[in-house]
Amino acid sequence: MEARIGLARAYVAAGQPDKAEKVLKEAMKIDPMRPEPYIELAKIYINQGNIEEAVKILEQGYEKTKNEEIKRLLDEIKTGYETTEDAEQGQSKENND
């Protein structure tokens, strides 16, 4: 499993997140109880600006693993996303005034 995680990280470093995503999804199928593939895939989605997909994959990971690191990351993303959303709504309201 560590080899797959390492390979996925190498793909990300080489600018090939699509290949990393494939490797991580394979890792999830092989051992769905390991938290690392969910966390690494969520990081890829976050770096791509795809917060909804990151949240979805972390929710799936937490449901299967009950891992505290996944829960913490999920809470951080949701809190940050809500804060950003509130700020955008505030700016939108100011622009309409």
Image (cartoon, rainbow, N blue to C red):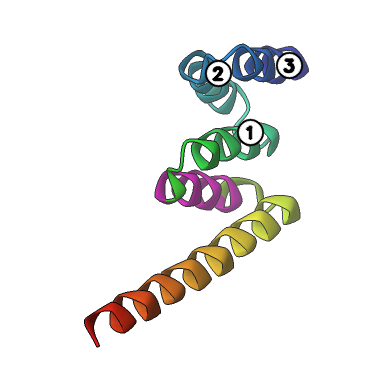
Identify whether 48 is placed above or below 87. Answer: above
State how far apart marks 1 and 2 are (Cα). Answer: 9 Å
- Residue 44's x, y, as percent? 55, 33
Q: What residue type is disc 1 on?
A: Glu
Point 59% across, 22% down: residue: 27
Disc 1 is placed on an element classified as: helix
Q: Quadrant of the C terminus?
A: bottom left
Q: Is residue 77 magenta?
A: no
Q: Report, in whole angstroms, how far the alpha carbon at label 3 lies from the one at label 2.
A: 10 Å
Mark 1 — residue?
Answer: 40
- The kind of residue tagged 2 is Ala
Query: Which residue is more in the foreground, 47 or 37?
Result: 47
| Residue lying at 48% horizontally and 67% vertically, measured from the top left | 84
Name the residue at 62% across, 64% down.
75
> 57 left or right of 32?
left
Q: In the structure shown, which secondary structural element does the residue marked by tag 2 occupy?
A: helix
Disc 2: which residue = 20
Identify the magenta region: 52-63
